[in-house]
Amino acid sequence: MSVPVQRLSCADAREAEDLSAFLARLLRYDRAAAVRLQAGGPDGALPQLAVFGRPPSFEVLAIRAARLAEPARLDVTVSAGELLEAIQGADFTVPGPVTGPPWAGVLPPRGGWRDLAGLPGADRMREAVAAAVAEFRARDEALPEERRTRAERDRVGREIWSRTLGDTPLPLRAVHAAQSLGFLRPGVPAALLASGSWLRLRTPFGSVALRTGGLGPLSVTPTRPPHQH
């Protein structure tokens, strides 16, 4: 179904710049990335644009909100590259819709989130990521030549990044994603939230979200159609 072209206005130039920076980071991981855009609540009165993306290296959803100058109603999946090109100032035209990837049909719930205890501060989380990166490099370098394959390196990476953070159920790869996308910065407050099968690491600069997948790794594998958005 086609969606009419719509023009949006960010609250100020800084909001547009931050949104552009987020899109540029997503495109570093996937040059063909798509993003789902949503604006407006049930009454269409929320002056905010939510942008959802999925950097493939981390298997999480990344969420960046941008304040709008005026209320708007929108729900469309577009090319991240085309959207980045369109943002030349606070006002921009939303690109035409694209066929969304499977993840775009399964987004986190809007409400029902509760705080989970045990999340370390941002600086300690960044230290945990640095330690994991150092461990991966050391173990990779220690692999004998005959075992230095993509499959073996992926196995080592999955083992390290699937570990949970402290006493929380949050996998380290979600923390790594938050840092790599510019959400987890030194000294900023962060919160860990849960709603149903979803976990969400939230900071003032954005969030990463993922679904719990039973006894296996946490993932965002689609299992149902869009829900209450």
Image: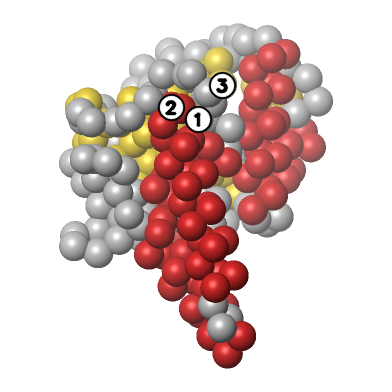
Measured from the top left, where is residue 133 in percent x and y?
53, 52
What's under tag 1, amino acid-wise? Leu
* Of marks 3 and 1, the one in the foreground: 1
Quick check: marks 2 and 1 in contact, CB under 8 Å? yes
Q: Nearer the viewer, residue 157 or 17?
A: 157
Q: Nearer the viewer, residue 58 or 19?
A: 58
Measured from the top left, where is residue 13 in percent x and y?
72, 13
Q: Nearer the viewer, residue 13 or 132?
A: 132
Per the model, the C-alpha gap separating discs 3 and 2 is 22 Å
What's under tag 3, amino acid-wise? Ala
Secondary structure state at the residue bearing disc 1: loop
Residue 50: in sight, yes or no?
A: no
Name the residue located 64 percent from the left edge and 28 percent from the top edge: 19
Q: Check disc 2 and report the residue beneath it.
A: 122
Q: Is residue 41 above or below residue 160?
A: above
Name the residue located 65 percent from the left edge and 24 percent from the top edge: 18
Q: Earlier in the sequence, mark 2 or mark 1?
A: 2
Q: Is residue 54 above or below residue 12?
A: below
Measured from the top left, where is residue 223 in percent x and y?
29, 59
In the displayed structure, does residue 53 sit left or right of residue 175?
right
Q: Earlier in the sequence, mark 3 or mark 1?
A: 3
What's under tag 2, amino acid-wise? Ala
* Of marks 3 and 2, the one in the foreground: 2
Per the model, the C-alpha gap separating discs 3 and 1 is 17 Å
Per the model, the C-alpha gap separating discs 2 and 1 is 7 Å
Examine the image and state in which quarter residue 21 appears: top right
Q: Check disc 1 and report the residue beneath it.
A: 184
Q: Which quadrant is home to the C terminus?
A: top left
Measured from the top left, where is residue 168 in percent x and y?
24, 40
